Structures are given as C-alpha cells and as structure tokens.
Image (cartoon, rainbow, N blue to C red):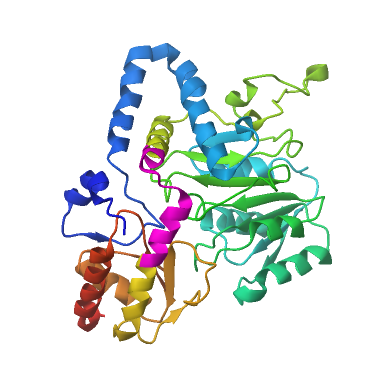
Amino acid sequence: MLDLRPHFSRFLDSQPERLHFAAHSHHPWPDVTREAHLKAWDDAARLIDDKWEHVLGPVFEEFRAHVAEELNLPDPAAIAVAPNTHEFLKRILSCFPGDAPVRILTSDSEFHSFSRQIARLEEEGAVSVMRVPTEPFASFEDRFAAAAREKEFDLVFVSQVFFNSGFAADVRRLVDAAGERAMVVIDGYHGFMARPTDLGDVAERAFYIAGGYKYAMAGEGACFMHCPPGWGLRPRDTGWYAAFGHLAHAQEGRVGYSSDGWRFMGATFDPSGLYRFNAVMRWLRQEGLAPAIIHAHAKALQETFLQRAPDCALLSQARLVVPRDDLRRGNFLTFETPKAQAIHRALQDQHVVTDVRGDRLRLGFGIYQTQEEVEELLRRLDEAAPLA
C-alpha cells in the first residue's frame, strides 16, 4: 500500500488533527508545488515584460506535453488553457449562430458550471435542452444513444465521471452516440488523473475539458481543453491570446484564428497554476505514479471503508449510489441519505472534511491517504453518530 504522506507534508501538517476526505473536491497539493509557485514569482521578477514569452513558450509547451501524454492525444498543440472550465463553455457556446436556439443533449447530472449556465440561457430561449437521467447507470449509455437518435443536436455535453454520484461512463460510447454532426464535449474533471483515460480513438472528434483543481493536485487556474481539428473554428468569445500563432480565415478583414488549440485561448491569466501543474506531473513520473496506480490505491481504500460502512450507525441506512460491485466508479463514494447534511456537519465537528450535495454525502479518496486514515475516519464516524 502506498504511503505518500511525506510528499504532502505542508498541507497535512498545517492541521494535523484534520482528516481530509474530499479529494474529489479540493485536493491537497504535494510539496513540490510550493517551489513551483515561488518559481512563477521569481520568473515574473526576473523577466518582467518578457514573462509571457516564457509562460506561453516553455511553460505552456511543457503543460501541453504532459496533458497529451496522459490522455494519449496525437497533438499537444490542440490544447488550450484557461483559469476555469466556465470560460471554455462560453467559448464553445459562442461557436454557434445566434439566430436560433442551440440544441443541446446532456445528462441530468452535470456540474454547476454547465448546468447553471445552460438553465439561465434556457430561460431566454437561447438553448433547448434534452437531459437524460443518469440512473439507472447500467442503461445510461444506451438511453443516451437513443436520445441522440431522436432528433438532431448542435451540442452534446456530458461528463466522464458524474460529480454527484461517481459513476464513470464509457467515453467512447458517449462520443459515438453523438453522431457526425454535433459538437461533442466531454467534461473530464472528475476523470483526469483519477482513472486511466485514453482519448486516442476520439481525439479527432471530441473536446475534452479538465483541470488541476482535483486529481491533478495543482490547485486553481490550470484548466485545459483539447480542441479537435475542424470543430469550432471561429468562437465569437475570443481573447487576444487567440491571435497568437499562425492565423487562418482572416481574408477580407475577418478576424483570424489559429487552426489548433490557440483558437480557444482567452486573455491574460495567473500562470502560477501551470507551474504547479508541471511540477506535479514531473513528480508523479519520478515516483512512477500513473492514473491506473492512483485509481487502484483509491479503490483499495474505498474497499476498506465499505467493508465497515454497514456497521456505522450513520451510514447503515444510506444508499451507496454506485453499488459496491460496480467497477465503473471514480475515486469517491456517494451515499444518499436524508441525514447527509447532518452527517457532514457532525464530521466537521470531528475535524473531518467531506462534501455534501443535497441528500448526498461524498467521500473522496486520494494518494495522500493510507489505511490508517480510513480506519480513523470510521472511528470518527462512530463518534459523530450522537451528533447527527
């Protein structure tokens, strides 16, 4: 069993009594990110006006190379970066003409950066949306494909791992379901660096968005999108960074765009997240830690927890949303119970960090944990029972 706690000493030692079981939400950063963060500051001081040539040169190129290698993408140049995934969503939506509602196929379990924005546009008739329920999970991909055949869609947007359950869908089947006409976007934030992900077969067809805040362990500001060639060539929401590189489609006074990922770039941002991301990826390679190993470690911790969970008074009546014997799960467990909010608060009093969404309590497992932390979590759950 891995014990990588010494590599997370600054986060873990800052509050030794705290147990952090929200890796799916806010992942601790390994110690190597502190030096990387300082390097971003030092480069800014050293280079001043020339900083962006360095950031958008060597730093960005290393970032893209890491992402392309992890996802088996054929061309790192197809990757754009942004401070958050919401920027990418706005640019995706701006690729469509404004004279008719954008027809969208999605699930009923997308994260708020998408679901809130789409609901607001729906209020004004700017989009029309079909939402396919994710449950029952066993038939989700089939039902999603059937919905895609019912009518024509402009945009298909769906998660790789759903944030409110942990269910991991089959990315290839989701992309195939979209057909040939619709723009396809896979939200990979809960899948990237949590589960092995190979996009080689769909790289020419699907956009893929993720970032550093969760399992890439790099914190805020390091989001990316793989942009397949030939799709979304001229987003109306466009920043001045999109003017870099070789520009095409600029004839007769039209605004020009690169044909690679630069076409989805925005404007000035805090680059320190890229430094941290690069440091994490170098550290993972040095330690031989691929997503398959990370996921196996998380599953082993989950299994230890689930063996004892039925004995916990607080969870004995809770529904494990993705069943124990279903291997299509991310690195967190979701329990549905009317007591979810009360359990979350009771665990807070026990210095245990979890996450709650309505009546669903989420427990995330990561490489900064060992069996020892899981046993302590179970003990504190027992102690919290009278408080909930």
Viewport quadrant of the C terminus: bottom left
Residue 16 in percent (x, y) is at 16, 55
Q: Nearer the viewer, residue 264 or 117?
A: 264
Left or right: where 102 falls relative to 358: right
Which residue does the image show at 82% across and 64% down from the upper left? Answer: 149
348, above or below 172, in the image: below
Left or right: where 185 falls relative to 40: right
Q: Quadrant of residue 279?
A: top left
Total numbered labels placed on residues in the image: 0
- The magenta stretch is 283-300
326, above or below 195, in the image: below
Viewport quadrant of the N terminus: bottom left
Residue 100 in percent (x, y) is at 80, 50
Residue 107 in percent (x, y) is at 64, 64
Q: Main secondary structure of the magenta part?
A: helix
Which residue does the image show at 21% across and 83% down from the upper left? Answer: 386
Q: Quadrant of residue 313?
A: bottom left
Left or right: where 226 falls relative to 8: right
Which residue does the image show at 32% across and 45% down from the upper left? Answer: 29
